[in-house]
Image (spheres, rainbow, N blue to C red):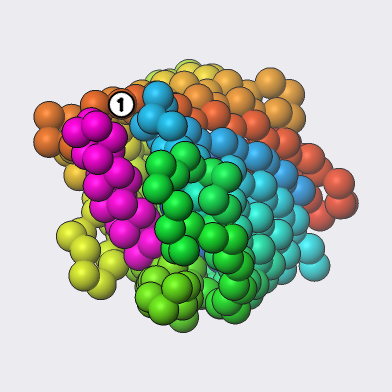
Amino acid sequence: MKKIILSLFLLAGAFESMSQQDPLYSQYFNNPMLINPAFAGSNERLYAGVAYRSQWSGIEGGPTTFNFNGHIALVDNKVGLGLMVVQDQLGDIKNTQYSTSYSYRIKLKNTTSFAFGMQTGFTRYATDPNGVRVLNPDPLFATFTETKFNTGVGVLLQNDRYTLSLSVPRLLPGTVSQGGQSIQVYSQNYYLYGSYLFYVNERVQFKPSALLRVTSGTPLSADINCNFVINKLYTAGVFTRKFNTYGALLQMVMNNYRFGYVFELPGKGSALNYNTHEISLSLSLDVLRSHNHSSPGF
């Protein structure tokens, strides 16, 4: 019984944190449009991808996140259009986000470009009592749904060596009222992302990156990633989130497909000693004459 009560308190605390922050990802640097709409069309091709994340595997009702996203470069690669669906679930609580993205890209010097983007959509907040086992029925454990509109913006400076991104995916904080209680579904999250590509030799590249996330009322979150790219086809690396979570990443490119896998381990300061798994599959195609035909362009 004590273990059950402890788990419920930990899950409640996790939901409070997740309700104020966007879903966690470990492969955002593969498709940064998840955190910045300015990346729509940035690879100058047609892109589509799916990803699934199981956090704290082994805990019944633990956090899971599924996302589908796609984008395409249009008008001589100056305009990008994108679509994204993200479903984030914890126990009986499910948030589903639907959004469309638009970006405009300005060519600067050599391969450098500057882009700004905007996304609009809505989030559907829902609770389903069948998602958890309730020992003592309570009026709060009832089916409930509410939909909230939102919009976001971002800017991007990029070339073939570095990337610098600043974004706010949700400008409008959203709350819902359930059972007479006000629940904050999400608030403003500010993202600052940067990466740089070093050429070790003709076959090997080293790509470090960092992501800072700022949310009102919560500590600063920092991700640090170190990846090695071999023959532009295979990637292996390690990362840490706030030096409290550690993980390893593997990915492989085959023709126009890319498969990725992430394994995370909690650090000594983590409340729960459970692993996290994340897998992704994406596709990149050159379907227009103006698209990049030389490589998959992931």
The secondary structure that dominates the magenta segment is helix
Where residue 211 sits: x, y (%)?
Answer: 32, 52
**Above or below for 21 versus 293:** below
Mark 1, residue position: 274
Relative to 206, 117 lies left or right = right
Q: Quadrant of the N terminus?
A: top left
The segment highlighted magenta reads 1-20
**In this view of the protein, which residue sits in the foreground, 259 or 61?**
61
Which image quadrant is residue 297 in?
top right
> Residue 32 location in percent, x, y?
51, 52
**Left or right relative to 215: residue 162:** right
Q: Quadrant of the C terminus?
A: top right
Classify residue 280 by image quadrant. top right
Residue 261 in percent (x, y) is at 50, 25
Return the residue found at the far front.
Answer: 136
Q: Is residue 290 visible?
A: yes
Q: Is residue 155 visible?
A: no
The kind of secondary structure element at disc 1 is loop
Q: Is residue 10 magenta?
A: yes
